Image (spheres, rainbow, N blue to C red):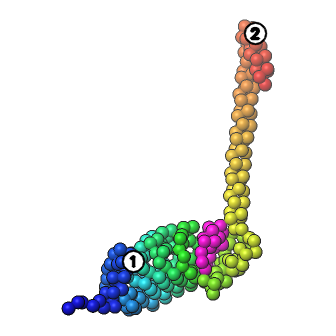
Amino acid sequence: MQHLLGPREFLSLIWSLLFGMSVPAMACPVSCHCIERNGLTVVQCMSRNLDKIPSDLPKDTVVLLLSSNQITHIPNHAFRELRYLQELDLSNNAIDTVDAGAFQGISDSLLMLDLSNNHIQAVPKDAFAQLRAKISLSNNPWHCECTLQEVLRELRLDPETVNEVMCHSAVQDQYAGKPVIQVLDSGINFCNFHHKTTDVAMFVTMFGWFTMVIAYVIYYVRHNQEDARRHLEYLKSLPSSSQTSQASKDLDTISTVL
């Protein structure tokens, strides 16, 4: 009698045919609750007082809910094994650091990323590289400067929360408290401020070195002149005629130098 595939077996077969491999099953983390939907896994870890992302997440996770915990850091390759992950909710945590490679490995599959209501002030330029997901960054204490401008240029921000991405601080104080997109849409370029600040710093440094060189030259000349005067006075004090004759010659030489 021919064996008929059940729904889960059939879905696993489809994944295997599409991606050339089976989807390995893993037990649900102790601190989370896992639900199967159409043969794939939704992992619920909300409000579990977690201070870091669980490392033993099922590899067939499609939805990962980590909101309302105490997570402070998203390390490199935190989700690399979750190649089917489509939705990631990290809202309402205490995240203040996002590593440059935090989302590497899920850029092709991820459709939604929520980082709202955290403590993020800045992210590395490549933190969201190649992500096509709709991203929420609202209600974080962003510092508006050149890197943030370059990061936002490449993102697909959630249109419903885009005006809640505020400049908590900025390279120019007058932009603090304003929506980042509103400031950028007005024509402000934070990268220009960055370049101007760098130019001013370089000018101040070069001026400082130039002043030190001039001061040294002046000191060197004055010091040599003082030594020459002392030698001249010494020669004048010599008593003998032969010494006087020699002193006169030296005097003429030194006078010429001075």
Residue at far top of view: 242
| Residue 12 spot, x, y in % from top left | 34, 83
Q: Alpha-carbon distance for marks 2 and 1?
A: 107 Å
Q: Is residue 205 left or right of residue 75?
A: right
The label nearer to you, 2 versus 1, is: 1
Tell me what residue is drawn at x 41 percent, y 76 percent: 83
| Residue 156 spot, x, y in % from top left | 60, 78
Res. 18 mark: 1
Residue pointed to by mark 2: 245
Total count of labels: 2
Q: Secondary structure at mark 2?
A: helix
| Residue 111 appears anywhere in the view | yes
Say which of 244 and 255 sits in front.
Answer: 255
Task: Tell me which corner region of the image, top left, top right, bottom left or bottom right, holds residue 126.
Answer: bottom right
| Residue 48 appears anywhere in the view | no
Q: Residues within 10 Å of mark 1 (few under 14, many from 20)?
A: few
Q: Residues within 10 Å of mark 2 (few under 14, many from 20)?
A: few
Say which of 76 and 154 sits in front.
Answer: 154
- Between disc 2 and disc 1, whose residue precedes? 1
Q: Report the magenta residues as a range.
A: 140-157
Q: Is residue 19 magenta?
A: no
Q: Is residue 145 above or below residue 39?
A: above
Task: Tell me which corner region of the image, top left, top right, bottom left or bottom right, holds residue 232.
Answer: top right
Tell me what residue is drawn at x 79 percent, y 21 percent: 255
Of the residues shown, which amino acid type is indicated by label 1?
Leu
Tell me what residue is drawn at x 60 percent, y 71 percent: 154
Q: Is residue 194 above or below residue 218?
A: below
Q: Secondary structure at mark 1?
A: helix
Of the residues shown, which amino acid type is indicated by label 2?
Ser
